[in-house]
Amino acid sequence: MKDHPATEHAPLPAYTDAERLARAEAFRAHMATRRTVRNYSDQAVSRAVVEQALLTAGGAPSGANHQPWFFAVIESPETRKRVREAAEAEERDFYETKAPQEWLDALAPLGTDPDKSFLETAPVLIAVFAQRRGGPRPGDHKKNYYVTESVGIATGLLIAALHDAGLATLTHTPAPMGFLSEICGRPDDEKPFLLLVAGHPADGATVPVAALDKKPLDQIAAWV
């Protein structure tokens, strides 16, 4: 494929095969310590740390480089309380009327329930929104492409960046999540994608052993 005449290029970093393997092994080992935490301390989190993690997420690949994401950082206790109340209302409905028994059985080893007190205890909630329209420049209102895929990749980078900074996270997806748009004051052409909890684990916090059961390589990948 020929380059567009106006296209400019930036150089890429170069490593030896040994350096690549060492970096890959070190990153895998570090990310293997990531845990989904439901018991948080109310210890404050540096805004500068969150900002750097968001910038990492903002560097994710996206359809046509439109970067169709928005991150609403919720810190105030009053707003976190509103989010908890709205989320728990949806969660009670899910556990009591919506969820089929097979789903409830799958969740049982993880010990989840409608109580989402961590939404009020953790110092930082990040509401992730997917933008149907936008573009790479302020004021753009173009059609965005591969929105779900792009926002999912960005969210994964955000989780990795927060973990690398020493913070615990939890992905929360109450359904429906329309209350996040209202609470965060987001426009109608944005759809709530996910609510990410971030903070320090409470003293003595643990995770279910079942959550540590990860599939080996031969069950998640194949060379074809």
Image (spheres, rainbow, N blue to C red):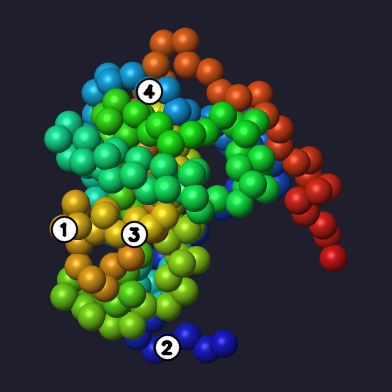
**Mark 3 Cα-neighbour bin, 10 Å: few <14, some 14–19, many ≥20:** many
Please tell me the numbered disc located at residue 185.
Answer: 1
CA gap, disc 1 and disc 3: 11 Å
CA gap, disc 1 and disc 2: 40 Å
**Mark 1 Cα-neighbour bin, 10 Å: few <14, some 14–19, many ≥20:** few
Badge 1 marks a residue whose secondary structure is loop
Q: Which residue is mark 3?
A: 192
> Observer-nearest residue: 68 or 17?
68
Sequence-wise, the earlier of marks 4 and 1 is 4
4 and 3 marks in contact (CB < 8 Å) = no
* Residue 17 appears in the rendering: yes
- Which quadrant would residue 52 be assigned to in this image? top left
CA gap, disc 3 and disc 2: 36 Å
For the point 21% across and 78% down, which residue is it? 140
Sequence-wise, the earlier of marks 4 and 2 is 2
CA gap, disc 4 and disc 2: 50 Å
Q: Which residue is mark 2?
A: 4
* Residue 56 appears in the rendering: no
4 and 1 marks in contact (CB < 8 Å) = no
Sequence-wise, the earlier of marks 1 and 2 is 2
**Mark 4 Cα-neighbour bin, 10 Å: few <14, some 14–19, many ≥20:** many
Q: Nearer the viewer, mark 3 or mark 2?
A: 3
Sequence-wise, the earlier of marks 1 and 3 is 1
Q: Which residue is mark 4?
A: 40
Residue 184, position in %: x, y? 19, 53
